[in-house]
Amino acid sequence: RQMCIRDRCNIMEEVTLSPEGQAKKALYSAVQPTNALTIGNYIGAIRNMVAMQDEYNCYFAVANMHAITVRQVPAELRKNTLAVLALYMACGIDPKKCTLYVQSHVPCHAELAWVLNTFTYVGEMERMTQFKDKSAKHADNINMGLMDYPVLMAADILLYKADVVPVGIDQRQHLEITRDIATRFNNIYSPTFVVPEGVYPKVGAKIGDLLEPTKKMSKSSEIQTGTVFLSDDKDTVLRKFRRAVTDSENEIRYDPDNKPGVSNLISIYTAFTGKSIEETEREFAGVGYGDFKLAVGEAVAEKTVPLQKEQARLLADKDYLSSVLKEGAAKAYKVASSTLAKVYRKIGFYQL
Ligand code: TYM
């Protein structure tokens, strides 16, 4: 259900209503189409996106403009873009309820990012942990886009007046800078942007690498035996879990500081089974690490193998996926262009 409201600048805006007739809050999130996605992406973000889609007016993007801050093979980027869309849908995101689109299909992202650049200080960007990490990893390509990445992310979120942004903990710093930029702009002009809140899962906001559990599990790790991809077949999943690092105690107890490996496995198990940490500890009391690791692997594969089948089924129907993206881009553009027009007016861009 939708209704139109007038904001202070006299622009008609459409607002989605909940069944009770209240305006739904807006939610924004995105995933980069780089490599195959990991169970970290699923647990940290996609799972929450699926769970929140009924309560919020959701915008979910495939962030291909962020992806090019690291050199991509064009054909792979194209392929991965559709793969992320199909994965969103295979995980249960419903394109009838949510706006699903590709970031580069809505030019307002680049346009707002340019404006927001003038409200962001170089020092702030240089301090970003992810920028420092990626600069070290891609020392031969420390491009402006890599540094400007959080400003583009701020533009994504602010264009849709998102109230909430479900992401993993690695994105917290980017969320904080988005809030700073929005507040700065609002203070200089008048309230324009909604200052968004990050939503982080209580358990699983940072899934660790299976071999180095204090390090984030990442799509782009050089050694991939500690990374479980959503596209891994069952044998590969089980093999990766069998090699997961634990400790010498032989007690299945959630204690991230002292037992990072076992706690990471417990987080993964709870995310894939819906059981609580306490239930999991009880279920595996007295069980050896070998059997526990096998059970976690089984729980993961039980979910990811059907996901892969559904993703493949969706990917076989390119016409349908294109229609979802066309509709998504049109819906996204409507909202984004209205925010951008408001920004342009406030900063003094002459309007025709
Ligand atoms: P990306 O593609 O790196 O990751 C997608 C989502 O997965 C989460 N995540 C994890 N969560 C828990 N444990 C892990 N090991 C793990 N690895 C990744 C990330 O926190 C993220 O939520 N910059 C974003 C994409 C983006 C975006 C946005 C997100 C672009 N614009 C606007 C939110 C709002 C990124 O690179 O995510």
Image: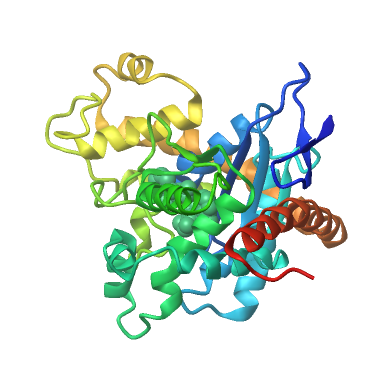
Q: Residue at x 42, y 44 (%)?
A: 168
Residue 114 drawn at (x, y percent): 54, 70
Picture quadrant where residue 132 is located? bottom left
Q: Residue at x 64, y 63 (%)?
A: 344
Picture quadrant where residue 282 is located? top left
Residue 121 drawn at (x, y percent): 35, 66
Residue 92 drawn at (x, y percent): 68, 37
Picture quadrant where residue 319 is located? bottom right
Of residues 86 and 147, which is closer to you in this image?
147
Work out which quarter of the rendered image holds the C terminus and state it: bottom right
In the image, is 1 to the left or to the right of 74?
right
The total number of labels drawn is: 0
Can residue 85 be seen by looking at this rendering? yes
Above or below — where is 351 with respect to 156? Answer: below
Of residues 203 and 104, which is closer to you in this image?
104
Of residues 178 and 270, which is closer to you in this image?
178
Q: Residue at x 55, y 54 (%)?
A: 31
Work out which quarter of the rendered image holds the N terminus and state it: top right
